[in-house]
Amino acid sequence: QVQLRESGPGLVKPSQTLSLTCTISGGSVTTNDLFWSWIRQPQGKGLEWIGAIGYDGSTYYDPSLKSRTSISRDTSKNQFTLQLNAVTPEDTAVYYCARAPRFYLYDYWGQGTQVTVSS
């Protein structure tokens, strides 16, 4: 059974960097043909895809966030990480990590973590 768990600070100040880690159990970040994704949902809005890292370490980002986003992985810890720079209150959302056998098709999700951007 694959399980994903997000971790990181729940409060970030404007202009700072949001950093979240997703820890994978029951699976591997290097398993062929899988993509490990970050998705967020602002309150009252729909899901927003942020980006993903592939099994081979290749990265993919939403164009509207690309200039502020970095996704990386630590294969020794079986984790992947989201960094979102220069955050504003508009980045306040529940952030999820998820596994995708194909782009935008998710089969396992983390429970989500609330991140609030506020001074």
Image (cartoon, rainbow, N blue to C red):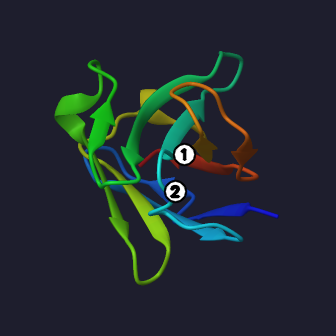
Q: Nearer the viewer, residue 76 or 16?
A: 76
Q: Which residue is mark 1?
A: 116
Query: How dense is the environment of label 1, judged by Cα within 10 Å: few (below 14), some, or many (20 and up)?
Result: many
Left or right, 50 with reference to 85: right
* 110 relative to 102 in the view: left or right: right
Query: What percent of the width, then of the height, locates residue 73?
Result: 36, 65
The residue nearer to you, when weighing 22 against 54, is 54
Q: Is residue 69 above or below residue 49?
A: below
Give residue 65's quadrant in the image: top left
Kindly identify which residue carries mark 2.
11
Name, please, the residue furthest toward the front: 32
**Furthest-right residue in this view:** 1
Horizontal and vertical percent for residue 57? 29, 55
Residue found 54% across the figure and 45% down from its top: 116
Badge 2 marks a residue whose secondary structure is strand
Placement of 76 over or under 64, stated as above or below: below
Q: As drawn, which residue projects farthest toward the left? A: 67
The answer to the question of whether label 2 and label 1 lie on touching residues, with beta carbons closer than 8 A, is yes
Disc 2 or 1, which lies upstream in sequence?
Answer: 2
- Residue shown at the point (64%, 67%) measured from the top left: 27
Label 1: state its secondary structure.
Answer: strand
Instruction: Report the side of 48 relative to 105 (left or right).
Output: left
Judge whether residue 83 can be spotted in this image. Answer: yes
On the rendered image, what quadrant is the N terminus found in? bottom right
Position of residue 66 measured from the top left corner of the image (x, y, whole percent): 23, 30
Disc 2 marks a residue whose amino acid type is Leu
User: Depth check: 70 or 100 in front?
Assistant: 100
Is 80 situated above or below 77?
above
Work out whether 71 lies above or below 46.
Answer: below
Amino acid residing under circle 1 = Thr
Q: Please indicate whether residue 74 sits to the left or right of residue 99 in the image.
A: left
Mark 2 surroundings within 10 Å by alpha-carbon count, few (fewer than 14), some (14 through 19), many (20 or more): some
